[in-house]
Structure formats: structure tokens, C-alpha cells
Image (cartoon, coloured by chain):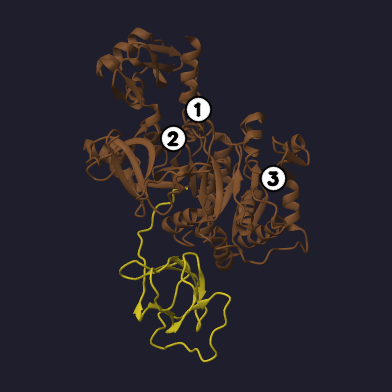
Amino acid sequence: MPTFKAGARLKSAVCNSELMLIVAPSQDVKLTCGGAEVIELGGDPPADAAIDPEQKQGTQMGKRYTNESGDIEILCTKPGEGGLAVDGVALAVKGAKPLPSSD
Amino acid sequence: MNLMMLLEMAAGAFGDRVAFQNGDGRLTYQELFEASGVLAASLSDGRIKHLAMLDESTLALPIALFGASWAGVPFAPLNYRLTDGELDSLIGQLHPGRLITDAARAKRFGDRFVSPDGADYIDVHSREALLESVRADGAERRDPNWSMEPEDTAILLFTSGTTGAPKAAVLRQKHLVSYVLGTVEFMSADEKDASLNCVPPYHIAGMAAIVSSVYSGRRVVQLANFTAESWLDTARAQEITHAFVVPTMLARIIDALEDRTEAGIPSLRALSYGGGKMPQAVIEKAMRLFPDCDFTNAYGLTETSSTISLLGPEAHREAMSSRDDVIRRRLVSVGQPLPTIEVSIRDAEDGSTLPAGEAGLIFVRGEQVSGEYRGQGSLLDDEGWFNTRDGGHLDEGGYLFLAGRVDDVIVRGGENMSPGEIEDVLLAHASVSDAAVVGIPDEQWGEAVAAVVVLEEGAVSSVGELQQWVKDRLRSSRTPQRIEFWDELPYNETGKLLRRKVREAFRESD
């Protein structure tokens, strides 16, 4: 399991998604993308990893994903077809009202 | 976290878009990414611990900012308006390192700037040589392996020092990345969007403009030496859609537009402003001159990584057209805190939290808030709150109103008064075009109220007349004991009134 530290860069084992942890969870969790546990950006996916057809919600570049309690937040830095989940619970896009440009 | 990750995303998603433009020079997002990697390689010799830049806005500026983050060294943009002596003392705090400056300034320093104690040195490179080197064929580029440590220092920004000697605010990667992720939607800009950047690099708004634009995918057109004419000409020629100005710039743009007979800037959709107090007359005039333009007022500090509160376009229009005084007043507010920022107004004496409507000190909390100076450590309290030392209050709707720096508050016989309140009254006089109020030492009261007034062209007034004007409108303690007439007030180039200079003048004339 990769280290969960704010700033850590991760990728999906089964699709093109690349991620960065904005808020790291305080305890050990199982973070998955496309149903398979995510790996460190430079790591090699397990040979038998395959995307779960039930978990193909996709990730969108530049979107932030979070859970209900907000104790984990992830930025998608490269999109892919897998969906993100923590301990089996799907993460949702962090909805933010667009702000007017101030600079 | 690292600003470079934001640029990498931009280069990956829209690498062919123009990122920065200066005159005929252009850099696409991909070119900016590659150039930053070349600079990063040359900074990665293990000895260089700072990258200082003493230069106006050129294409070398974003390369230096991102190249420094790639190499993991703090970037320190310096104020080129300082005297040689002031600059030498700032640069002396940045060794060992490298200084990039324009060829003319580079001559003054020679190849090396040796620290005052002679113990270390800073290599001096010219901006021209940098731009050439990053574009050279086969230039070595560093692997995309920048540190993602959130605590790394990204930018050291010497604060403007309107009250004292400049201090270096420490902005870490986590502060700036949080600011961008919390306020900018990735790739939200249209391909045709172009923003005009005329804020100097050593101002937090100049740094924020670079990182925000990169993440939104907007083309930034740099304008190094602001004049109203050059701003208007560039805005038209480059079909500028977005711009940020400080209040004095907006006032000059309006004057120039009123002198000219031609139409405004058809492409301009959004104009944001901040960096100093915007006179109500100026913003009202601007809204009439650009009726289709979205206006945004941004309030922020260097120590908060730029904007923490916004008065958006809808609030501007609502305030402008409202007959309700409460809503109309919001035109001179700084709007509501960002969703990622908490604001609390506290009593200056006992620190208790004050309800809406009551004025006190503005405290802020949020991921982007640094509140740290080099050599002093963090000024955040145990719960993460930062005392901005700005006074102000929130209204019932959560709109934030500023009342000036607490350091500027005049204490006369135990009574606290804000210079802004007295200045507003003076400014309402038909003969007065500008006014500054300060406290001066007074044997009887501790401090006394003194004012400097600039009269409208051709207008005549007297000390007695203006004293009576204030007396008729405010408590008598607020009547300026001394009033002087000057041709102009001392402002810094971002529109901040230098009260220190006004106070010094009174002290010297005693």
C-alpha cells in the first residue's frame, strides 16, 4: 500500500488516472480506482490487475474528490476511466461554486 | 504539493495554448514547462538555496517561478524601485543563491554579489542570458521529479513595508497550491480569454496572477510599465477579456477614457481590483463606463497567499442599483470571505469574538494562510488563526468592511479612532481631492489628529474651513489639530498610501 501523505502522487493500477492527495486520511484506508488499489506514481501495477466494470465512473482532470466526512481529498491530475472509492464507498466530486476571477 | 504539478497538468491538457506573452514574445504552456526544467537543471547543483529576481515582468518571470519550484529552491522576486542600499540588504539575506536581473542592473553587481559579511556569494545572471539558455537546442532538462513536500518554501516575498523595514513572508507550496485549488477551476478559461497583467512581480497579486492563470489556462499578456494609455492600447490590440488593477490604475484609466473620444474596450468582460482602498466615486464611474463588465473586488494580504475575500459582479450590480442603504454600502466592502476561508472579528483588548456590526480586528483561518515571516516563525495562534492587523467589521449579511491598519489607529486621550473615518469626511468636501490622516505625538493627549489634504485643481480652502467641516460631521475629538496642503500624497506603486511618510513629514516640520 502506498504512503498516504498530503502531496503524495498516486496512480490507478487499472486505468490512466493519476492522483494527488490533498488531504491525507488519518488512518489506514483502502483507496481504489476502478476497483483496484491505487499505487505510487512510479510503481508497477500487479500483473493480474483488471478494472471492475462496476466501477467505471471515470475521473476528471482538475476535479477534487472527497468522501462524506471530508477526511480524504484527492485531486485528479490525469483522467482515466476508473471511479475512486475509499473502503468500497465511492468518492464524490467536491462541488464548488465557481468564483469570479480575482487575479 | 508543488506549483510545478499545476503547470504539468496545464502543459499536459493544453500545451499548445499561449501561456504568457510580452510584446512579440510568446511562451506556450509546453514551452514554459520545458524552459522551467532547463532552469531547474542549472539550479540543482546542491549549492543554490535561493533564486532571487530583480526585474520587471518578462517571459523570464514565470520560468523563474516554476523553475525554482521544480528545483526546490525558494523564489524571491525583489522590488526594483528600492534604493541600491535597501536592495543590497535584501539580497544579502538570500545567499547562497542566484540573482536574475536585466543586463543593465547585472552590470552594477558584476558576476557575483558577495554577502556583506563576505562569507557567501550570489551568482548574478542576466535575464537575457536566461531566456537564451532555456531555448537553446539540446539544453539539459531536469527530470520531472520535483519534491511534493507541502512544507517546502515556494516564494519569499518581502512585504512592502509601509510601516517599517521589509520582512520576508514565507509562502509554502501548500499555501499556494491550496489557494489555486480552492479558487480556480482547472482549464476554466476559454481559449480566447486573455488577461492583462500589470502588477509588479514582487507584489503578491503579481505572483497569484501567474499561478491562477496557469491553472485556468488563460493567456497572460504582461505589461511591465503601466500608463493608462499603454494599458488601453494593449487591452484593445490583444483583445483582453480579464484584467486586475489597483485603485490608482483604475482612476487613471477612467481619466484617460474620459479624455478620449473613442469607445472603451469591447472585449473586456471582467475587471478585478484590489491592493488598496478603492474610492467609491471611482468604482461607480468605472461601472458606468463599462456597463457590461463584471467587477470583482479582492481583499488579501501577502501573508494569506493573496485573495481571502471577494465582492463579486452580482454584489456590485446589486449594490449599485439598490435603494437600501445597507446593500448600497456594500459597494465599498470587500465582499464575503472565500468558501475556504473563515473570518472572525475580535475585540482588540480582550480578544473576544464580536457580533455583526461591531468593529474589531480581522482574524482569518484557512489552508492558504501562511502568517509566517522568515526568522520569526509562524504568527498563527494555536487554532490556526492569523491576526491580519487590519481593522473591520462584518455586516448582517456577512460582508466584510475594512477600517484600515490597526497600526494606523490614532489613540487620542484613550480614544481609538480610525484615520479612514476622518479621511472619508474630508474627501466628501467639494474642494478636496485627496486626504491622509495620521496620529502625531501630543504632550496632552498622547496622540493628536493631523491631516494632509490635496485640493482639487483651482479649488481654494483653508485650515479653518476644513476643521469646521469635520467638526460638523464627527465627534469633536476627530477634528484635525493640524492640516497641511500638499500637491500630492505619497503612494507606493500599488496604490497603498504611505502613512509612514506623512507622519515623518509632520515630525520633521515640528
**Label pair 2/1, CB-CB below 8 angstroms:** yes
The residue that mark 1 highlights is: B491
* A75 vs B487, nearest the viewer: A75
Tell me the CA gap for discs 2 and 1.
10 Å
Q: Is residue B462 above or below residue B182?
A: above
Q: Quadrant of residue B114?
A: top right
Q: Colour of chain A?
A: yellow
Mark 3 on the same chain as mark 1: yes
Tell me the CA gap for discs 2 and 3.
29 Å
Q: Is residue B413 above or below residue B238?
A: above
**Is B32 on the left or on the right of B178, as rendered?**
right
Q: Which mark is residue B462?
A: none
The chain letter under disc 3 is: B
Q: Colour of chain B?
A: brown
Where in the figure is residue B298, as x and y percent of width and height? 41, 44
Mark 2 on the same chain as mark 3: yes
